[in-house]
Amino acid sequence: MEKAVLSLFELNQLVRRSVRTCLPDEYWVQVELSDVRANYSGHCYLECVQKDPKSNSLIAKARGIIWSNVFSQLKPYFEQETGQAFVSGIKVLVKVTVDFHELYGYSLTIVDIDPAYTLGDMARRRREILLRLQEEGVLSLNKELELPVLAQRIAVISSATAAGYGDFCNQLENNAFGFAFYPRLFPAIMQGERVEASVIAALDRIYAESEKWDVVVIIRGGGATSDLSGFDTYDLAASCAQFPLPIITGIGHERDDTVIDLVAHTRVKTPTAAAEFLVNHLRHTAEQLENYAYYIRQEVPARLNREKERLERCITRIPARVQMRLQREDFRRERLAKRMEMAWQSRLAKEQYRLELSSRLSVALQARLLKEKHRLDLLEKSVEAASPDLLLKRGYSITLKDGKAVTDASLLKPGDRVVTRVAKGQFSSEVQGTDMHAE
């Protein structure tokens, strides 16, 4: 039996018929757009992907196409409804038909899109960014800064060619009150994928010379609403929230707030509104100064009159108060004089008594000295009477053995050598015997 052999084209035809038979309807599918590009004919070619939420790795992919007649209507509708550009990286809910081509293989043809799904995803991302900033404790830092009373030195982040920047400067320069402002442009890209990096770089340049500026104004005018996605990033929002100068945003849209609008010190709708805010702030300051000046003009004369009256009252009270004070001082002086007199008398009596004690002490010392001298004379005589030399002169002698006086004959033994001292000299002898009963 011969085997049935198909060519690749025939096999792909079979697959195509099977796909159309099994999947004949249109299907709503949640996808993330990737590699979005439109060609010269108006067709849009892209990839539909799905990523693992934990590892962010691709788990599904399909080639997609939007034919020009659909794309020309679908793109502006989506961007108008969401304010989000139809670009790679966004999540969308699209209606597709499933197809298989013999040469190009499996693909999805997008025929419709639901902007509400993307709006929900964008809102979720914004909520996540705001929640993260709140957990880090920086969400309201810029809002808590105090706007300088004289906010005249303005660091402007915008595109040099943006119509909104020109409107902003004209509004400041031609304000009805003649206030002077000193704006300086820090150029940045205000639409497209480079918005985040460009605005952060401008903030860094302003931070390097932050002492020169009072406020920062981020304005954008004339661009499409779909270019606002660059202002909904965590890094840009964190930089704005933690910036040391108040930030005013006027990005030019009314329906939705971007993340940096929510963390900035003040959010206005347009660049012109930002200029009006600064003019009104300075006008409020000027009004306060005028009120202070009026208060000074009105209150100073009244205060001077009150103080003059108070001074006059004080002057009238001075003689009586001086007289009373003099009387109190005289009374105090008299009391002090009496106390001093009594104190001196007491001290004089003490000194006189001390002098009497001194004379008595002198007499007592003389008597004691005589008594002690007499006692010393008696002691001297007693010492002289007890002197060994005096006893020796009377005929007594001292016998020494080994340099010690012998007072007990029983301590001597025959043959011991002893020395006998007399009044004049000494002599040695040897013990022959001892008599314990001799008197």
Image (spheres, grey):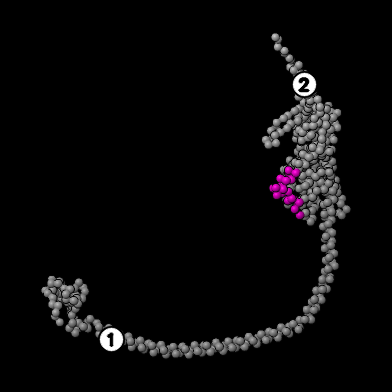
**Where does the magenta region start and end?**
127-146
Q: What residue type is labelled 2?
A: Ser
* Front position in the image: 179 or 323: 323
Q: Distance of mark 2 from mark 1, alpha carbons? A: 157 Å
Point 77% across, 29% down: residue: 46
Look at the numbered disc 2 and give the secondary structure of its residue. Answer: helix
Disc 2 target residue: 18
Instruction: Using residue 358 as the reference point, say whether residue 303 is left or right of it.
Output: right
Quadrant including the N terminus: top right
Residue projecting furthest to the top: 1
Q: Nearer the viewer, mark 2 or mark 1?
A: 2
Quadrant including the C terminus: bottom left
Instruction: Using residue 145 as the reference point, say whether residue 424 is left or right of it.
Output: left
In this rendering, the answer to whether 400 lies above or below 268 is below
Q: How many labels does the image show?
A: 2
Q: Can residue 273 be seen in this view?
A: yes
Disc 1 target residue: 381
Q: Which amino acid does label 1 sit on?
A: Lys
Expressed as whole percent of the image width and height from the top left, the position of residue 174 reads 87, 50
Question: Could you say which disc has been placed on residue 170 in the image?
Answer: none
Going from the N terminus, do you reach mark 2 or mark 1 first? 2
Instruction: Using residue 371 as the reference point, say whether residue 35 is left or right of it.
Output: right
Q: Can residue 185 be seen in this view?
A: no
Callout 2: few (<14), some (14-19), or many (20+) C-alpha neighbours within 10 Å?
few
Point 76% across, 41% down: residue: 124
Point 25% across, 83% down: residue: 386
Expressed as whole percent of the image width and height from the top left, the position of residue 71 reads 83, 30
Answer with the quarter of the image where residue 125 lies.
top right
